[in-house]
Image: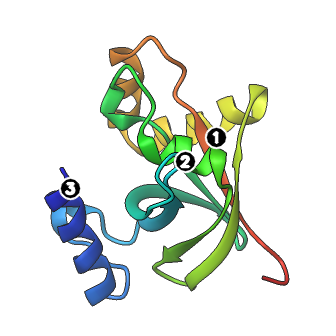
Amino acid sequence: MADWNQQIIEEFRASGGTVTTMGFGRTLVLVHHVGARTGTERVAPLRAIRVDDDTWLVAASKAGAPENPAWFHNLVAHPETVVETPDDGTVPVRAEVLVGDERDAAWARFTSASRGFAEYQEKTARVIPVVALRRRSGA
């Protein structure tokens, strides 16, 4: 998986954010995150839904695995980070885990965008977290 992610990251950066692999197009962002335990900086290519000029949503689906992805735990531990976007370049953001109705509405956007997300939820007993990446002003 690490090699596949690295290929996606390289394609994203080489093409200005357009990823033809698996038909992603311009739907991905590269989320930088710092290891909660290790302190090591990593980058995760994630499907994002842009809500407005200052907010991107990402879902911690991990393809329906029983546990949340490492990047999710890292963003909870270190919420101030940056994302690389197809349209705005590198943007400083703060990660916020959505809860309640706000999470449910955001999750509905993912399942509407791709049946795959609904399938991920069917595969797992956990509620898949949704994270809002909000642009930090003055950063």
Residue 106 numbered mark, or none: 1
Q: Which mark is residue 50?
A: none
Disc 2 to disc 1, C-alpha distance: 25 Å
Image x and y of residue 86, in percent: 46, 79
In terms of depth relative to the viewer, which is nearer, 70 or 112?
70
Nearer to us of marks 2 and 3 is 2
For marks 1 and 3, give the one nearer the viewer: 3
Residue 49 % position (x, y) = 54, 56
Say left or right for 53 vs 81: right
Residue at 29% across, 72% down: 9
> Quick check: 127 above or below 1?
above
Q: Which residue is mark 2?
A: 36
Residue behind mark 3: 2
Give me the residue at 33% from left, 25% from top: 65
Q: Secondary structure at mark 3?
A: helix
Which quadrant would the C terminus be assigned to in this image? bottom right
Q: Say what amino acid the circle numbered 1 marks.
A: Ala
Label located before the other in sequence (2 or 3): 3
Label 2 to label 3, Cα distance in Å? Answer: 18 Å
91 vs 70: above or below = below
Q: Indicate which disc, 1 or 3, sits on the residue closer to the N terminus.
A: 3
